[in-house]
Each structure stands twice: as structure tokens, then as C-alpha cells.
Image (tube, rainbow, N blue to C red):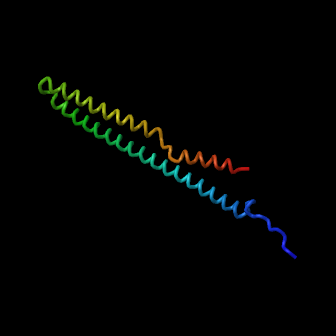
Amino acid sequence: MMPGPTPDRGSKPGLFDSIKGLAASSVAIVRTRLELLSTEVAEEKERLLSLLWLGTAALFFIGLGIVFAALLLTVALWENHRLLVLGILTLLFLGLGGAALSMALKQARNGSKLFSASLAELSKDQDHLRP
């Protein structure tokens, strides 16, 4: 007795092919999410460095403004023109320090958006996987 024709396995995907496809899709999703996460970490690092530089500039210029204010009070008893120059420099440095401090506080109030895009994408993934 001759055996009958065997079914062609190439035309229909089997269970193992489906599992392989699911695993490959899962790995691709995880990789995409990790890439997004690393991008968000890099953006947060840049935000924190910017905040650090603005805070440092604010402290520097306010410090200079205080020094010039002290010099202004010291020189106030001297001749006329020194007072005007020191007053202008004091206002300039205090203004620069106040502007830098204002920018730093505004940026700090905006808060961090770390992982917000990753969380949104994971929520979408979760919604797609629910029946």
C-alpha cells in the first residue's frame, strides 16, 4: 500500500511559525519602546543641563549685582560720575541675573516630560492587545 500524498506544510503556517512571528513582533515592539525611552532620557538630560546652566548664570549675575551694589554704596560719598556708572552696572547685572532666574524657574515649573511618550505608546499597545 502506497502512502497518500502528504500535506504541504509550506502553504499553511504552523503553530511554531505563529509563535515565531509573535516573538519577532514582541521583540520589535520592545526594541522600539526602548529606543523611545533612550531618546526621552537624552532629552531630559539636556533639559536638566540647561536648567543647571541658567541657575548658575542667575547666581553669578545676582552675586555680581550685590558686589556692585556694595561698591555703589561705598562710592556714593565720592564724586558724581562714578555713582552713575556703578548704578548702571548694578542694574545691568541684577537685571541679567533676574532674567536668568526667571527663565530657570519657568523651565522648572514646566516639569519633566520624561517617559510621557513611552507611556502613551505602551497604553496604545495595551489597548490594541485587549479583546
Q: Residue furthest top?
A: 80
- At 56% across and 52% down in the image, what residue appears? 32
Q: Is residue 70 above or below residue 117?
A: above
Residue 45: x, y in percent?
43, 48
Q: Which residue lies furthest to the right in this view?
A: 1
- At 79% across and 65% down in the image, what residue appears? 7
For the N terminus, the quadrant is bottom right
Q: Is residue 118 above or below residue 82?
A: below
Q: Is residue 59 left or right of residue 113?
A: left
Residue 113: x, y in percent?
50, 43
Picture quadrant of residue 86? top left
Q: In this view, does 75 lie to the left or right of 57?
A: left
Q: Residue furthest bottom?
A: 1
Q: How many marks?
A: 0
Residue 98: x, y in percent?
33, 33
Residue 131: x, y in percent?
74, 50
Q: Is residue 10 left or right of residue 121?
A: right
Picture quadrant of residue 93? top left
- At 36% across and 36% down in the image, what residue appears? 101
Residue nearest the viewer, comparing 37 with 7 = 7
Q: Which residue lies furthest to the left in this view?
A: 79
Q: In this view, does 38 lie to the left or right of 131?
A: left
Picture quadrant of residue 70? top left
